[in-house]
Image: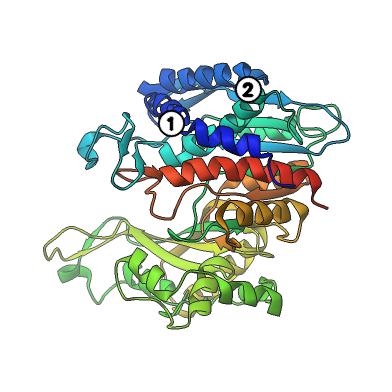
Amino acid sequence: MPAPKAVIDYINANADKFIDKLAKAVAIPSISGDGKHRGDVVKMAHFLKGELEAVGVSVELRDLGKHVMDGEELHLPPAILGKLGNDPKKKTVLLYAHYDVQPALKSDGWDTDPFKLVIDEKTGRLIGRGSSDDKGPLLGWINNLQAHHALGLELPVNIKICFEGMEESGSEGLDDLIKAEAGPGKYFDGVDCVCISDNYWLNTRTPCLTYGLRGLSYFKLKISGPGRDLHSGVFGGTVHEPMTDLVYVMSKLVTPDGKILIPGVNDLVAPLTDKEKALYDRLDYGVEDVESAAGGRIAISSEKTTVLMGRMRYPSLSIHGVEGAFSAPGAKTVIPASVSGKFSIRLVPNQTPDNIRAFVEKYVKDEFAKLGSKNTLEIEELHGGKPWVASPDHYNYKAAVKATEIIYGKTPDMTREGGSIPVTLTFAEALDVNVLLLPMGRGDDGAHSTNEKLDRSNYIEGTKLLGTYLYELSTVQ
Ligand SMILES: [Zn+2]
């Protein structure tokens, strides 16, 4: 069922007021990663509490305790929990967004003050930190609640809200809250599905829905031998050199065209179905888009499907750096005593950090053993996170597809992303429900970059999209 005409009319008529509200939100520099701004993050939470209460939502600012950042103990910003509606005949959807932002300074290269929303009349851009990530999408929900409140209309679904203020700093405290509040009688009890609006279209043309994210296993491979750094004029040709061993072992991890050489790793990848391959063939994103985003004509293949699946549905191994190696300019003749290679694997179903680790450790040790080197090797996993894939056939996605078709007159691209949004997996696992990523902004919004923007049309049409999604959700089977 589409949203009532009165709601769409209200959004059109109040577009400028919604932009004013976005300007107020952007003006609060709620930077979670900078302790000096912690008060602003809390201020943002109170601003949103006021906005939500004004439209009938019962709100709790949930204390998440303390943490230490840069040696300083700080109070975590609260999670905003809210409820509206409790009709057992209606579906209950949980809405997630975050109200903190990345740091931004004019001197980083912004053309304007990052915390003063600039409306560029010529391009239709709303420029300011957090406009697209994630204050615009967050206010998109509140705009819809305001429309219903003002018109005296009941929402077609029950709503639960979870807005956090630490997303840009690892979502500290949130996983514990979600796990603690899952289960009978708890806050998240009765949630039928989750909608997260915190990512972007692939491009600037075609809306998308995102149903998968890759996971990550990050390794540090350390090789040491000498008791201290040595001089090659004295020790070259007389000892096993750690750097030589490391370069050899690292060269055995992946081929230049991206094939992972560690036995067992690729065998875990879920097989590709014809239906899934067809999704990639249809995507409005090509080799040129990838090369333009990369800033070089360096795509691994001229086949669009191969390139897109390389980012979205297959694992990849990247070599990131060497700690302890000589890296300054000049011709220093040092033999480093100890060097550590850093590499990571982006994971896809059915890979997990747990089942990947054993394959990586065994292979690296076997390859090192072949050298007959007297140096020692240690391998350590620095960080791990599981991949996530939802069923795009679930009613949650069907509702979002229909809503997109109504608002944009286009069927959305169904995409998976190469990176991670860890809270997605936490919701999916802890609540055991379908999670949908429904983006508002475009691929060129510059979310963590200078001159971040949200197009006016994406904000206003995106507000209609979120509202229409709630109506489609209420009737979809
Ligand atoms: Zn975000």
- Residue at 46% x, 17% y is 43
Spatial distance from mark 2 to mark 1, Cα to Cα?
A: 16 Å
Residue 380 horizontal/vertical position (percent): 52, 55
* Mark closest to the chain's N terminus, 2 or 1: 1
Helix, strand or loop under label 2: helix
**Amino acid found under the numbered disc labelled 1:** Asp
Residue 150: which numbered mark, if any? 2
Q: Please tell me how crowded label 2 is: few (under 14), some (14-19), or many (20+) other residues with Cα within 10 Å.
A: few
**Amino acid found under the numbered disc labelled 2:** Ala
Colouring mode (rainbow / by chain / secondary structure / one colour): rainbow
Quadrant of the image occupied by residue 210: bottom right
Q: Nearer the viewer, residue 369 or 342?
A: 342
Residue 35 horizontal/vertical position (percent): 39, 24
**Residue at mark 1:** 16
Horizontal relation, residue 40 to residue 143: left or right: left
- Residue at 76% x, 36% y is 156
**Number of numbered tags placed on the structure image:** 2
Residue 325: which numbered mark, if any? none
Q: Taking 292 as reference, is 80 above or below it?
A: above
Helix, strand or loop under label 1: helix
Quadrant of the image occupied by residue 274: bottom right
Q: Nearer the viewer, residue 416 or 330?
A: 416
Residue 424 horizontal/vertical position (percent): 63, 46
- Residue at 26% x, 34% y is 105
